[in-house]
Amino acid sequence: MKQLTSFYINSFKDLSKEVWWLALVTLINRAGTMVIPFLSLYLTESLSYSLSDVGWIMSSFGVGSVVGSWIGGKMADKIGAYKTMVFSLILSGFIFIGLQYITTFIEFCIGVFVLMVVADMFRPALFVALKAYSKPQNKTRSVTLIRLAINLGFSAGPAIGGLIIVKLGYGGLFWIDGISCIIAGFLLMNVLNPKRAIAIDETIVEHPKSAYTDKKYWLFIGATILFAIGFLQFFSTIPLYYKGPNQLSELEIGLLFAGNGFLIFLFEMPLIKWLEDAKKSAVLLILIGVIFIALSFLVMNLTDWVGILIISMLLITIGEMIAFPFSNSFAMERANRGKQGEYMALYSIAFSIAHIFSHNLGLHLVEDYGFAVSWYFFAGLSLLSVFFLFLLHKTK
């Protein structure tokens, strides 16, 4: 037991204080975006929008995320990651506050689009800064720490948001969302060393390679989009499967999802440390992680036994813990070739594109063909991603 405890504690060692500060800022920022899970409820209940209108607004959300990630990458290359992150956090805070005063459909589409453009400038800049503040041997664990912060933020945010709505209404939610982003921006200004950040951002790479001409990186991006489309069913069709055919209560569904978050919090960092020490190829490890994600879909078609849902959740959790940190690590490592902002922007855009298509695709498949066909389809997408990763591993 002492050895396990020691290994767990050691897995967090040697990370720079700047990475810890970035994790704290990310935690505040992610917990602060608590309005997002309640956006559809706010639009239908408070503003009386139809589900079709909400669908278009959420599409504006996804498109804004793509544009914001692209602009954020460009800004990180031009003015530096530090300035880009501060600009994104503070300005998005004011936009969050202003969003509550918008009521018409067109205005809300534009408002959500602008919000996501500004807010998602943060993501590629964060990855560039993370790369700058991490020792080469610690990059994957640094990414994992940020993922832990994001998971904790997403776990705490909805709970806090629900309490705020009960006590202060939706107006209070927008105010607190905005203020938390502004606080995160000012915290970033005060805890990171601007001189060091600027010096790193201005490092010149001889003959920098554009991400847009890197064919191997595009193969990686294609594989990422495919497995992300499958994984994101975790937030749309899979809960419907739990509630519908399996007749789980909201409490039981909540416990399954809580189990995912708890396992990630408990095991992801030591797992990544162990895999790093094994010195395996990042692409090979991503491939293994995506196989686990594919298996999580396939096992749900094996039996009607409700316990298979726990096995499926365990498989997708293992896949997530392996595939996501090492895919991020691969993108950061590939960015050494030159234009870091471009590379990290493309990586962020891959997930934004997956968000745009994943939920609509999954819901339509379930409605037209049922859950079993849907699970085979998303397992197939994941295995196609595995094929792309295998090609990348052989040509890397």
Image: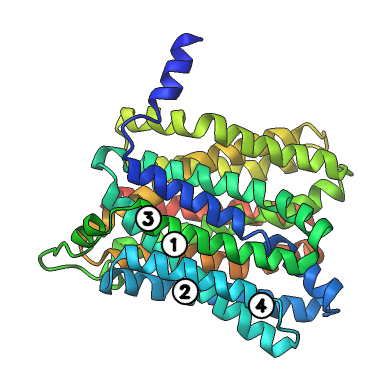
Q: Earlier in the sequence, mark 4 or mark 2?
A: 2
Task: Tell me the residue at 51%/59% (across/down).
Answer: 183
Q: Label 1 near label 2: C-beta < 8 Å?
A: yes
Q: Which mark is residue 94?
A: none
Task: Tell me the residue at 59%/49% (across/down).
Answer: 153
Q: Label 3 near label 1: C-beta < 8 Å?
A: no
Q: Give whichever of 122, 140 is nearer the camera.
A: 122
Where does label 3 land, which residue?
A: 190
Where does label 4 land, which residue?
A: 99
Amino acid type of the residue tagged 3 in the rendering: Asn
Could you tell me how far apart the alpha carbons at marks 4 and 1 are, in whole angstroms? 21 Å
Task: Tell me the residue at 53%/69% (across/down).
Answer: 353
Could you tell me how far apart the alpha carbons at marks 4 and 2 are, in whole angstroms? 18 Å
Q: Earlier in the sequence, mark 3 or mark 4?
A: 4
Q: Which mark is residue 68?
A: 2
Could you tell me how far apart the alpha carbons at marks 1 and 3 are, in whole angstroms? 20 Å
Return the x and y of residue 242 as percentages of the image width and height. 81, 46
Mark 1 neighbour density, 10 Å: few (under 14) some (14–19) many (20 or more): many
Of the two numbered discs 3 and 4 in the rendering, the one whose residue sits closer to the viewer:
3
